[in-house]
Amino acid sequence: MNQIEPNLLKYIWRNSKRDQLWMLVVILLSMPTYFLSLDLPKRIVNGPIQGRGFENPDDTAFFLTTYLPVPEWMTGGPIVIFPGFELDRVAFLMALSVTFLGLVAANGLFKLYINTFKGRMGERLLRRLRFELFDRVMRYPLSRFRRTKASEISSMIKDEVEPMGNFIGDAFTQPLFLGGQAITGLAFIFIQNVMLGFVTLVVVLFQAWLVPRLRRRLIVLGKQRQIEARQLAGRLGEVVEGIQDAHVNDTTNLERADISGILGRLFFIRFELYQRKFSVKYINNLLIQFLAFLFYAVGGYLAIRGTLDIGQLVAVIAAYKDLPDPIRGLIDYDQQRLTVDARYAQIVEQFAADDMQPAELQNLATGPVPPLASGFEFSNLQVIDETGSKLIEKASATINLGERVAVIGAVNSGATQLTEVMARIIKPTSGKVEISGQSIIELPEYLTGRRIAYIDGGTYFPQSRIFDALTYVLKNQPVRERERTEEDKAEYERALAEARRSGNSELDYSADWIDLERIGVSDMEGLENEIRKVLFDVDLEGDIRSLGLRGTLDPETYPELCQALIAARHTFRERLPDLGFDGFVEPFDPQVYNNQATLGENLLFGTSRLPAYDPSNLPSNRIVRSVLAEAGLEKELFEMGKEVASTTVELFGDLSADNAFFDQLNYMDAEELPAYRAAMNRIGTLPMEQVAEADLQLILKLPFAYTETRNRLGLLDDRMKDLIVKARHGLRETLEGLEVPPVNFYDPDKYNPSASVIDNVLLGRVSASVAEGPEKVNEAIR
């Protein structure tokens, strides 16, 4: 089917007929209880409250008397099935009140069921619609994507169809349910008093005539808002994709002006929408309150004259209280229907395409995919682009299997377009392109996708693991089911049944899609060997290995691999002398200060899981500061920081910011020198307790980033190092006592999940005195 049903109501009915009919049955069943809940207040007021039927103290009445529902003229009188319960006045009042409460609860349960059912029905059809739109995108001719912004397509499928989910469930049930309640309420008022019934009917009809006309402009504004929002999404996508050009060509302000203009148009459209929306709401509420005025005035007058008893008036007012909601709901439904119809029409128009690929060409292969019997055969091939330019004109050629051919030409000479025709990216305007005697356009994708390879600068790489990106071409259809527990199987069957009911794909995304047989291997080890060979052939093996070593691993997901890396750590340390790296690496030892690491790294002795415990944030961390204060280190570090700041400002204060000396300062940037000079002037000789917190944190930042072997200011002696190690143990004890420890601490016999693979193997720091030490050590680990 190449066209979407253009009429939204027909689309909804075709895909939810059975559910809609069931809703009709439930709504009809709910009407009697709704009517009884309107009638019962009158009986309560006229009966036990006003005393009608209880004129004498000993009078009783029968409750729940049941009659055979046939006309009396047929039987000569009522036929009693159940005489009921005989109750006095108070008991009768309580019985009627409890019945009223039960009817209210029953009405609430009906509403709960109806709303839940139609909500599920709406979400199911919304899921179907979104999938059908996505399915159409997958069958679009590829050339169409050059004219269509990806952000606009995603915005339409994700955002623009979202409001339809609410309407889809209401499409037929809402007018039936609300209409049934409104008719029941009006009928009840007519039964109580014909004059009040006619007054109500006239006001309601006037309201139903006026409000939709006032809302017509809202529909137009809604369309404009939708178009502008779509343009905004498209422009934002364009700007993000071309952000490099915007910076290179100094056009960022041009882009700001463009986006600002779109946002301005959106603002005025939305503001007018709000104005008109609330104006219509004001008029609607005014008409409803005018009807209340008529009830109190006319109904009260009739009650005074004696033509309407108090119980009837109370019942009419109670019915009126429930009447505005269904009336307003029906008017809102009509507005929503018109708005959603307009939105749906726009989406149908946007996704309409007569040249979509037939769905059967994307079906799964039902057996082994055959090899190509012959190469390409071109006959009078002609390609004309959207502007009418002839890119290829009456080209004829043959490319045999196994033949190597280079198509050479300038830009727009047709060379690129010829390869795009061969890959079915663009369709020929005329002529033939055949493989094995069959037109390439008519070949199924399972054949062309597995037998013809095409690579250009726009090759797609999914946002995922490198492994997934490399094996993407092998994931053509599920080849092995995923192993599931009984609980998982039940959940999967439920999801599969729902996908079937929603017209979605029934393929299991979590199954194993990698076709190992296609590349001639039988297990994952063989696949990894093939990947390694390919990476070696394209000279990417070293790069991929480096990426992996810089990544992290979860010990719970890869326990065996993490244990192997711990073993590699010990082996590496043992072989350091054999490798000629003796003295290159200083390992992390919980009992020893690491001279190659910063003071902050030595104190924390681990990798942070929260930003507050990053080394740069330690000066502002209250827990860290309290531990330092208890260890008597806070003042010493403050004095050390002042010494570092004073020395640095004195030595480098007069140098330009681009001086090469600043490359050696790991604890301070050139831009920070003025801030430290000003802080030192403010601090002067003040004791630490009188220094402003901002200045204190600024000064403490310096010792936390200080490394004696690199900065060599002679500020760290053995006594200070021992105090840092002692504070390290206190900090670890404190943090491990928290519900979720914010730091993964270094441990020679444990894997650190927040450290990189290479840092886990190294578990130490490379000496700063060794030339190219980190590069040599990293190469040895690889």
Image (tube, grey):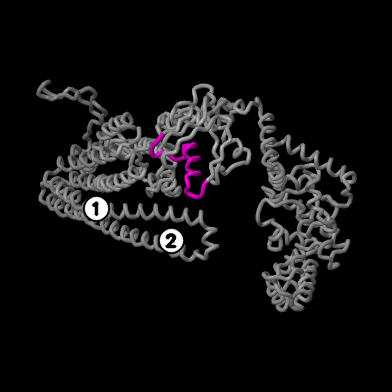
> At numbered mark 2, what does the secondary structure look like: helix, strand or loop?
helix
Residue 438 appears in the picture as rendered = yes
Residue at the image position 15 percent from the left and 46 percent from the top: 201
How far across and down, in percent of the image, does residue 217 sit? 25, 55
Q: Which is more toward the observer, 603 or 551?
A: 551
Where are the magenta residues, as a range?
Answer: 409-431
* Above-or-below relation of 658 to 448: below
* Above-or-below relation of 62 to 293: above
Q: Return the mark for residue 259.
A: 2
Q: Based on the displayed image, in which of its 4 quarters is residue 461 positioned? A: top right
Residue at the image position 68 percent from the left and 29 percent from the top: 526
Q: Return the mark for residue 216.
A: 1
> At numbered mark 1, what does the secondary structure look like: helix, strand or loop?
helix
| Amino acid at pointer 1 | Arg
Q: Which is more toward the observer, 580 or 314?
A: 580
Q: Based on the displayed image, in which of its 4 quarters is residue 24 positioned? A: top left
Residue 552 appears in the picture as rendered = no
Task: Check if residue 484 falls in the magenta segment.
Answer: no
Image check: 51 left or right of 126?
left
